Image (spheres, rainbow, N blue to C red):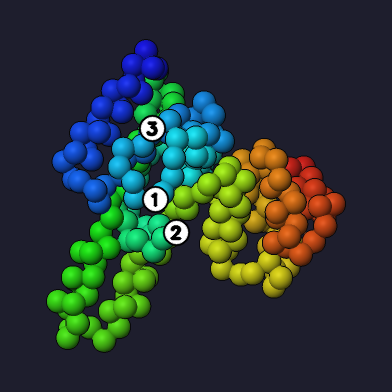
Amino acid sequence: MQKARFESSKRLADAIVAVFGERCEVVIHDFSDMARSVVYIAGNVTNRSVGAPITDLPFRLLKEFGNKVPDKIGYKNTAGNGKFLKCSTVFLRDQKGKVEGCLCINFNVTDFVFLSTVFSDFSSLNQSSDREELFTPQEHYSKSFAETVESVIDTMVAESGKSPATMDKAERKELIRKLDRAGVFMIKGSVDYLAKVFGASRYTIYNYLKEVRNVR
């Protein structure tokens, strides 16, 4: 049944790209192996290939909501090559509601954004900065699972509104609590990377993590 579900999703991916053309990419992820979750790609917008890891956005959503994770529809993003994208992520479930993977649509709207900028050039003095703010990256298209984990950490650090160097102990522990809840520390290499971000030792990170978990 699972195989049939993914095969149907692949046909749907081909159909979507056939309609919307070369500006469109549809990626199918199988969550049975997060480190190599991409099992099919129709089109090419983000320059990934089969065997690429899960990206940070669905990883975070899945860790936060589990099988009740909501689809994320029509969000704006940027690719590493500077393209502006409009995206949707739809989670794939079995008959009992268990999440098995997701189907992601990435549509390159760079040309449309450029035309919009030209047409509104005389009505806005800060169009370029507005455009950049509008397409602040929400998702990072990693080449390896380690990069995905690093993106999750970087994003959550940025969301805290402070650099780790200016955080007090309580703020650092709160950040570690959120990272732990997101499942980051289940991934090999996450402690080493966070130690670099904090400018601290692995021993310090483990101590913070121990204190956070003991409070629960």
Residue 168: x and y in percent read 73, 68
- Which residue is disc 2 drawn over? 80
Q: Earlier in the sequence, mark 3 or mark 1?
A: 3
In the visual, does 97 lie left or right of 176? left
Q: Identify the amino acid type marked 3.
A: Tyr
Q: Position of residue 128 (x, y in %)?
A: 31, 78
| Residue extending furthest toward the top | 1
Check disc 3 and report its element: helix, strand or loop: strand
Q: Give the distance between the C-alpha atoms of the residues marked 3 and 1, in whole angstroms.
A: 13 Å
The residue positioned 25% from the left and 33% from the top of the image is 14
In the image: residue 92, left or right of residue 121: right
Q: Residue furthest right?
A: 203
For the residues labelled 2 and 3, say whether their Cβ atoms are less than 8 Å apart: no
Q: Secondary structure at mark 2?
A: loop
Tag 1 and tag 2, C-beta contact below 8 Å: yes
Quadrant housing the N terminus? top left
Image quarter hosting the C terminus: top right
Q: Amino acid at mark 1?
A: Thr
| Label 2 CA crowd tier, 10 Å (few <14, some 14–19, many 20+) | few
Spatial CA distance of label 1 from label 2 is 8 Å
The Cα atoms of the two marked residues, 2 and 3, are separated by 20 Å
In the image, residue 141 above or below residue 136: above
Pointers 3 and 1 in contact (C-beta within 8 Å): no
What residue do we see at 31% from left, 37% from top? 42
Query: Residue beneath label 1, please?
Result: 46
**Residue 45 image offset from top left, x and y in percent:** 34, 50
Q: Nearer the viewer, residue 138 or 19?
A: 19
How far across and how far down the image is residue 36, in percent?
A: 53, 34
